[in-house]
Image (spheres, helix red, strand yellow):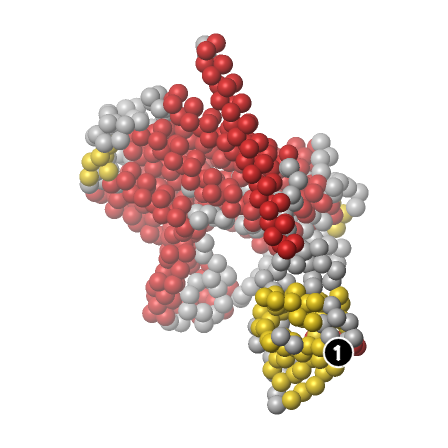
Amino acid sequence: MSKFNIKKHIRIISAILLASILLECVLMIYNLGIKYVFNKMKLINNAPITIEMSDITVNEEESNIYLSYNSNEHININNIELVLKNKNEDAYIRFIHNEGEEEMKKSNKDENSFKAYLAQEASMSDFKIVFPSYQINIENIDKIVVNNNIKYLPETVFSIYELCIIFIVLLSFYIFICVYKKIKKMNIKKEKIFLFLGISLGLVFTFINIPLAKYDEHAHFWRAYELSCGIIKSGTQELPSSIFNIIIDNDGIYHIEERTSYSYLNEMLNIELNKTEKNMNTVGATATLSPFSYIPQTLGCLIGNILNLKPIITVYLARISNLSFYIGIIYIAIKIMPKEKWKEVIMLIALFPMSLIIAASVSPDVTIISLSILLVSYILYLKFKKEKVNLIDCAIMIILNLTVSMSKIVYIPMALLYFIIPKEKFTNKKQRILLFLITLLVFVGTYFIWQNIATGGVTIIRTSTTEQIYFTLSNIMRDVYTGINTIYKFSSDYYFTMIGGWNTQPIIVIIFSIILFITVFGKNNNEIDEQDNVKLEKREKILISIAVLISALLIFVGLYIPWTRACFTYVEGVQGRYFLPVLLPLILILEKNKFFYDIKNKNNILMYLIVLMYIPIFINTVSSYIK
């Protein structure tokens, strides 16, 4: 960068700093003005007077309760509040005074109080509060407060903290524009775009999301920690109590929802790892999940365990190792995918808010989603490469399919995708069938061995699986109706939660959908794709359709048999993220050039658009944890 440019940037940054100071001064002046107005309106700086129930006369006339107060004091009333002991639904309450009457409405801030603000002052010497007797129990009335102060007035001092926030926001916009100008003419590869966005956006999610708050992360962390201690069969050995104490109190009561705030995060940071004090708290239904899906998280927990780090620090290490695994696997999947349009589809799926939120957690879905995408990508790579499939290729496909299907058995039909690799790519005609049979045999053997090991694990049992099987077999048409009703009732929820995760606004899901639609069905005239002849035949699309359909059916069956209660007219427990592993092959079936468009530097524009979409998600996430 030239000397002139350096001076230019220094001048602009100085101007941004000055603008930030001016904005903070404007905010301070505004707060001072509000304080002055509120003081004139007698909303603040009052001396509140509390009237206890012992000083109030209670009368009942014609189904109404009258609360009366007589006093020799001649204090003017600006506002009056009826405080209840417990929360009460809305009630019609009137405040009658010597100048007339006012309606007392429920306070916006406190759910157990009703308040009236007077347009003109009333005398405190004589007043009544009236309400229907059936709306409020007289035993629930606590007190009456006269001239109470509002408690949500902002600070009026010059805030360095606010100044820093304003400066960082303005500076970020400036940097954003400068970087865009620099790289807008560069042809950045899709895998590098994913690498940049995956690392940056994923790390933000890693640290702004409260640990163990969503998607059963607490149970997954405990299971990963178990494995890091060498405990394969869950529930057979005790774990340090401090690992559980993050969200469980001494009485064994869970406090997940109450402990989802940044203020409680400070308390979690004070919990030290104590390996001498142990107990046998269960890890729940995660006990039966395959260790294959916990490999990345276990590595992070192992590091924390060896270094004796605080439990909450170990959670962050498990998140980072999980995210690193996800980014690495998806990067490889994009890089080896033989067609540019397909690369873009992988990039978009991998950058869905749901995908990244899960990737930045301790969830085992990270392994399932990333390896299923890599499996599809690797099969297509073998299909279109010039060389024949060798033993190493076969071993890689078996390992990928085994890891995915062992993590969740419903994805075993993905092995059918082996048959889209032409038989000419194998050394003999029988090798492809042999590869499929070996995959099934290895899976069946490994699955039953694991089930035998995990049988003694501590699990959560909702229903009798045997009884539910009998119920299912007793009426096939009822099962079909249940499936149709489930899709009709929850399809939109599945779609929105497949793309958008926690704190994702619906408009973001819609924008992602539009981008994906353009990518799948459109052709950019400004992009030269040398792989336009790379496409799937009709027979191959039918085969993929069968694999996707069976997997989707197994997702519903897998939750209908062991999880859904009998006689329910819909399947319980199905979530949108369960369909992410089969989304890529589904899109490959639909992909076609239906229309053409002209967008220069589409990859760069796409990268910046995704960043912009994530800004409101981050803001929404942070605000939800500030309590």
Which residue sits at x=67%, y=56%? 44
x%, y% of residue 581? Answer: 41, 44
Q: Which image quadrant is residue 484 in? A: bottom left
Please, is residue 380 above or below residue 550 in the view?
A: above
Left or right, 163 with respect to 532, comes to right
Q: Nearer the viewer, residue 41 or 151?
A: 41
Percent of width and height locating residue 194 = 42, 31
Q: Nearer the viewer, residue 362 or 566?
A: 362
Q: Is residue 173 above or below residue 521?
A: above
What residue type is disc 1 on?
Answer: Asn
Which residue corresponds to mark 1? 70
Which residue corresponds to the image point at 24% horizontal and 27% vertical from the top-left? 526
SS under mark 1: strand
Residue at position x 71%, y 58% in the image: 46
**Does residue 393 appear in this view?**
no
Image coords of residue 558 (percent x, y): 45, 57
Neighbours of disc 1 within 10 Å: few (<14), some (14-19), many (20+): few
Please give the name of the residue rendered at 59% of the width and 34% of the height, measured from the top-left corner: 163
Query: Residue 601 location in percent, x, y?
Result: 31, 27
Q: Is residue 308 visible?
A: yes
Image quarter of residue 18: top right
